[in-house]
Amino acid sequence: MLDNQKYAELTGLKMLSIFDVIISNIKRDKNVTTRAYLIGLAAKLSIVSHNAQIFIQNGLLDYLTLLSFQFNSNELLIQSCCLCAYQLIMNAPITNNGAETSYGSNNVSVLLGQSGMQQNIIKCLYLDLQEKTMTAVVKSVYALAQVARNCLEMFKVGVVQQLLELIKTRGEEIQVDCGQCVYVIRVKLHQLMEKVKSVPTGEIGIWGVLQ
C-alpha cells in the first residue's frame, strides 16, 4: 500500500511517530534482515519529499552507509538500501530547506558519494544478483550520478563499461535503466569539462571547479 504516493503521504502526516520507530529500531536492532525490512519501509515512505526530508534529518544517511558495508551479497539488504538511497536523493536532494548548490556539502548525492556508500553500491554492479535487486542497484547509481563529482569517480573505476556489459546480458528494465545511467554520466562529465575549460589554467584544481 505504501508504494502508492497518496498513502505514503497520509502515513507520514497521520503517524508522525513512525519515523522515530523506524530510525530507533534500525539503530538498536542487530538483526540484518530486520534492518533491511525497516530500510525498505523507509524507502516506501520516502517516495514523498516531506517524508524523505524527515528521515534525512534524523540520520538515516548514516545508517544507510553503515549497512552498505554489510552487503556481503545479501540481496534483501542491497535492494532495500539501494532503493532507499534512490528515493532520498530523488525526492529530497538537499539535506535542509536552505538554498544550496547542487555540489554543496548538504547535497545528498555528494554525502553518499563521500561516505563510502557509493563505492559499496558500485561493487554490487559486478555481483550475480537477481533482476529485482540489480534494478535497485542501477537506480541508485542513476541517482548518485546526478552530480558530476560522483560521475567522475564512477568513470575512473569503470562503471560505464560495466553498465554497458549489463545492457548486453540483462532484461529490458535494467537495460533501460543502465542506458539512462550512461547518458547522465556522459552529460555530467561533459558539463564538467566545459566548466573546467572556462577556468584559467592553474587557477584552481578540479575539486574547486566542483564546488
Image: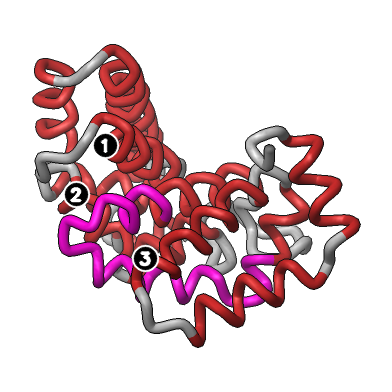
Give the overall secondary structure of the magenta segment.
helix
Q: Which residues are magenta?
A: 55-80
**Amino acid at circle 3:** Thr
Viewer-side residue, 54 vs 188: 54
Badge 3 element = helix
**Amino acid at circle 2:** Cys
Please tell me the numbered disc located at residue 124.
Answer: 2
Quarter of the image for residue 111 reads bottom left
> Measuring 45% from the left and 46% from the top, which residue is drawn there?
83
Viewer-side residue, 149 vs 95: 95
**Amino acid at circle 1:** Met
Q: Would residue 137 appear left or right of 154 to someone viewing this image?
A: right
Q: Is residue 211 magenta?
A: no
Question: What is the crowding at mark 2: few (fewer than 14 residues within 10 Å), some, or many (at least 20)?
Answer: many
Question: What is the crowding at mark 3: few (fewer than 14 residues within 10 Å), some, or many (at least 20)?
Answer: few
State the CA–CA distance, disc 3 to disc 1.
18 Å
Quadrant in the picture for the N terminus = top right
Q: Which residue is mark 3?
A: 33
